[in-house]
Amino acid sequence: MKRTVLLAALITVFTVSGLSQREVGEIRKAFAETNAKLAEMADHPELSSVFAVELTVNKHSAPYPAVGIYQRMATFYYTYGDREKDPYPNRLLKISAVYKRSARVENIDFYFDKAGQLIFAFASDPEGSIKETRLYFAAGRLVKMTDDGKEVVLKSQHAVEAGTLAKKESARLTGIFRAALIDLD
């Protein structure tokens, strides 16, 4: 009986692990496709179907009281969605955000699937105790997380908080992107 339960538990773990590896593989493929499109846009913007909106808070880096240098920048990369229903580009591919406070610079990139769902977040903070974090999402849930290349237990408080924070920040920035689009109708 105990062997049957143990065997069932192991099969469940390997099945979930395989599912998450497949999801991570699909996310990595989408990540590579998006970056290829952005490279094409940078090389030949006149031929690209990818567009960008940039937003900078405190563009000239005037110092804030008690903070010093403070600046937030976000670049939203987008393309066409369903052209049958809407002929204008409005499908978000990636958001690159840079947060500067005094000498500290944090970068966060968010990647989205064709349905507009967050699938990957990459955060780097050279001055922080954790230099880089990678979060993989599928169907709105965190399926893998690494800190400085080491896998993090998904049920840990750190992973839950990081996943929640990434989803909240990507939703906030997505709202800003939606508001920035010019209504062409």
Image (cartoon, rainbow, N blue to C red):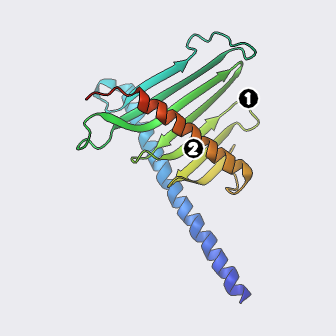
The residue depicted at 53 percent of the width and 45 percent of the height is: 120
Instruction: Specify whether residue 150 is in view.
Output: no
Q: Which amino acid, by three-letter code, is at mark 2?
A: Lys
Classify 22 as above or below 51.
below
At numbered mark 2, what does the secondary structure look like: helix, strand or loop? helix
Q: Residue furthest left?
A: 84
x%, y% of residue 97?
Answer: 55, 29
Where does label 1 land, which residue? 127
In the picture, residue 64 is in which quadrant? top right
Q: Relative to the observer, which residue lies in front, 171 or 132?
A: 171
Label 2 packing within 10 angstroms: few (<14), some (14-19), many (20+): many
x%, y% of residue 155?
Answer: 69, 57
Q: Residue furthest bottom?
A: 1
Residue 136, numbered circle: none
x%, y% of residue 75?
Answer: 48, 27
The residue depicted at 73 percent of the width and 86 percent of the height is: 2
Classify 61 as above or below 165.
above
Label 1 packing within 10 angstroms: few (<14), some (14-19), many (20+): few
Q: Quadrant of the C terminus?
A: top left
The residue depicted at 66 percent of the width and 48 percent of the height is: 146
The residue depicted at 59 percent of the width and 26 percent of the height is: 98
Residue 117 horizontal side relative to residue 97, left or right:
left
Residue 6 horizontal side relative to residue 60, left or right:
right
Where does label 2 land, which residue? 167
Classify 3 as above or below 178.
below
